[in-house]
Amino acid sequence: MSAPFNFSAGPAMLPAEVMQQAQEEFLNWNHLGISVMEISHRDPVFVRMAEQAEQDLRELMAIPDNYRVLFMHGGGRGQFSAVPQNIAGPADTVDYLNSGIWSEFAIREAEKYVNHVNVVASTLVTEQGKAIAAQENWQLSPHAAYFHYCPNETVDGIALHQVPDVAVPIVADMSSNILSEPLDVSKFGVIYAGAQKNIGPSGLAIAIIRDDLLGHAQRNTSTIMDYTVQAKEGSMYNTPNTFAWYLAGLVFQWLKRQGGVEAIGQLNRAKAAKLYEFIDQSSFYHNPVHPDYRSIMNVPFLLADDSLNDIFLQQAEAAGLLGLKGHRFVGGMRASIYNAMPMAGIDALLEFMCEFERKV
Ligand SMILES: *Cc1c(COP(=O)(O)O)cnc(C)c1O
């Protein structure tokens, strides 16, 4: 059988080229005769690599100079507590948009660290599917310390395609859409992302923080989660996840070779459009999200006959299409089509879906 296509939501597939390179230099990195995992994070050779990775990310995202880039521990969810602890006081109110399951988790975590988490709006069900209320209907608080949202809800497949227009610093959980298309970083106070969707191995989180938001951490913030300390220490207050950092660096270089976020964004939109178009013209498959709020990274779909789910997944796997099971909270199927998924993966999936519908 030819190599499978891996539609896992996360940890997700990584570019084949990157995996190949990592394999080739696994035992002998940089002609040192040892692995990148076996060297001090203070060694100048490692530090050079680490700085290059940050530089490449800065170039890819056009991150302005007044932002710090941190390589943090604890994945995406680690940032759910890091954000309120670092940029709000215990007596503050913070605003959260609830657009899906990850937003809900972020809200519950923030509630531990601030006086009041104000949910400005939640998802709605419209005739055309799940959607997010228009901004004029949000209940924003007058003095929030920040506004938090998740532009791409990985589980629900719901996306907000415009950056909200609010008066306070915007914090965005971009775990599943970072680097997927061009973005104006200067509109944000904090951008964070767990690495395992579009960047590298799990455990690592990238946090991009505007300078003026540093220096306000709550007194009892744990030191490894303190943005100000980590910014001062170059993300090496303690030993960082050196292997994940290295692999992230390889992915950034790969993305530059693909033409950066402009080019990958075009490809991502084309991949998603092809999939949605097929699903929409079918009466056998169904996507539950309003067309204006559909993710280009995570495409959930349901079968008209739910009892066929297991056999669909079994046959897909046998055909080399892996990781299509929907999240346990929502059921159905989900195709996660991050940067590393080539168009050939979409074509293979569509061919299978067509064939499955024809046969049953
Ligand atoms: C995957 C994901 C997370 C959780 O990341 P962990 O690294 O498992 O903590 C958080 N938010 C979003 C949007 C995600 O897709």
Image: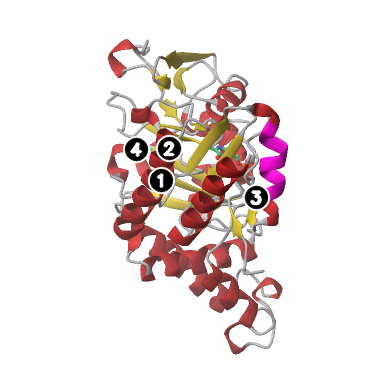
Residue 157 falls inside the magenta stretch: no
Q: Which residues are magenta?
A: 308-315
Q: Nearer the viewer, residue 210 or 56?
A: 56
Badge 3, how many Cα within 10 Å: few under 14, some, many 20+? some
Picture layout, residue 118 above or below residue 196:
above
Look at discs 1 and 4 and give the one toward the viewer. Answer: 1
Residue 188 disc label: 4
Task: Say if mark 1 contacts mark 2, CB within 8 Å.
Answer: yes
CA gap between label 1 and label 4 equals 26 Å
Q: Which residue is mark 2?
A: 295
Between label 3 and label 1, give the one nearer the viewer. Answer: 3
CA–CA distance between discs 2 and 4? 20 Å
> Residue 136 has which mark?
none
Relative vertical location of residue 253 with respect to residue 58 in this rendering, above or below: below
Query: For the residue marked with disc 2, what is the amino acid?
Result: Ser
Q: Earlier in the sequence, mark 2 or mark 4?
A: 4
Q: Earlier in the sequence, mark 3 or mark 1?
A: 1
